[in-house]
Image (cartoon, rainbow, N blue to C red):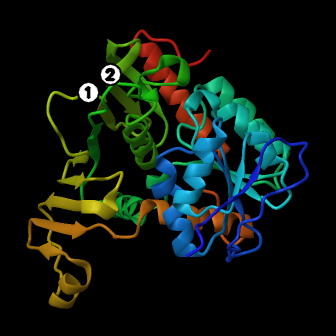
Amino acid sequence: MTPYTPTTHRGRDEPGLVRSPKRHKEVGPLTLRIGILGAARITDMAVLKPAAALDVPIHSVAARDVDRALAYAVKHRIPHVRDNYDAILEDPDVTAVYIPLPASLHARWTLAAINAGKHVLCEKPFTANTAQAEVVADAAAANSDVVVMEAYHSGHHPSLSRLREILASGILGEILTAKATFSVAIPPRKDIRWNADLGGGSLLDVGYYPVRLLRDLFGEAEVLQARANIRKDVDSSLTALLQFSDGVRGEIVTSMWPPRPAMPSLSIVGTAGQLRMRMPYHPQTAGRISVLTGLRRPVDKADRIRSGVVSNSMRWTERADRISTYLAQLRDFRDAIDGTGPNTTDAAAAVAQMRTIDDIYQAAGMTPRCP
């Protein structure tokens, strides 16, 4: 069998390409051909697998080390390799870019992609701070024909709509408190999330999810107080109390070095009931929404079989939809480009999120990242 060999382009001024002995079959909508800036590990789960499922072509990948990019392309059967990010932005065959670079580089390369006329799917956090997010949002607004989407994958999952539906039903009564947690052990050895200069820290990484989830459910928030534990010049863990405009008191808990394993969770307490969701940020894995209330909710047998609901007069549990958050995200990115769907995690929404992030940093006695 002939080994798979991507084409390579070492330098923007070289006109020639080394053609693969086995021609790559590019399928999918002609309006979307993705170039990847960086050979990051997250890309496989975040873009490559969803792209394969949706028949979205991955056109090329670039990395600072072209040999690393070449190895990545061979492993994932990406047809073209570039030795710098600009070469992807200048390629007319690339219509969109995915940016999984360190947070400190997000603003620079998102701006470059917008100016090159490319649609952008940029990993969260959208930028390292509010000031950067505002500059990028202004550029996105000035280039409205380009879709600029923050890759906050959890926000594209049906479970978010389901949570909003339950809250809007009034079955929990007046909402009093909400708590969202996300802690995961990230060994500090050579991981960029422990590097302050690259936008590291628990709040900008895993903590981004609980902050965004509570904001998605309850709107904008005032930061009442925050406390961070500092290790290697970054916040290894952080807690914050938030006050939402409708009176809901929120709490976030996040850590990159928790003392013991803990499942990510969301808990909401109202005057008439309580809701708890496990795995709210990756609901396709083991997501469950559990509601305890004094109100009756009759559910027939067919509904239990269809939706996985277990119910009595006081409690029910629903399985979250098993669609991948990343698949839903790439589908929404594609649809926004095609004009068949909205951009629900756009640059304007990212600015509001970064403003809350910066407020939490300041309340914890820290400065925003990458000033």
Which quarter of the figure has residue 324? bottom left
Asked if labels 2 and 1 touch by Cβ distance under 8 angstroms, the answer is yes
Question: Which amino acid, mark 2?
Answer: Ser
Q: Residue at x 30, y 66 (%)?
A: 320
Q: Residue 289, position in %: x, y? A: 24, 61
Residue 121: x, y in percent?
A: 63, 51
Residue at image location 74% in from the left, 39% down from the top: 84
Q: Which mark is residue 91?
A: none
**Which residue is at the front of the view, 272 or 370?**
370
Q: CA distance from mark 1 to mark 2?
A: 6 Å
What residue is pinned by disc 1?
257
Residue 216: x %, y % from top left: 46, 48
Among numbered discs 1 and 2, the one appearing first in the sequence? 2
Residue that sits furthest to the bottom in the current view: 302
Quadrant for the C terminus in the image: top right
Which residue lies under the disc numbered 2? 236
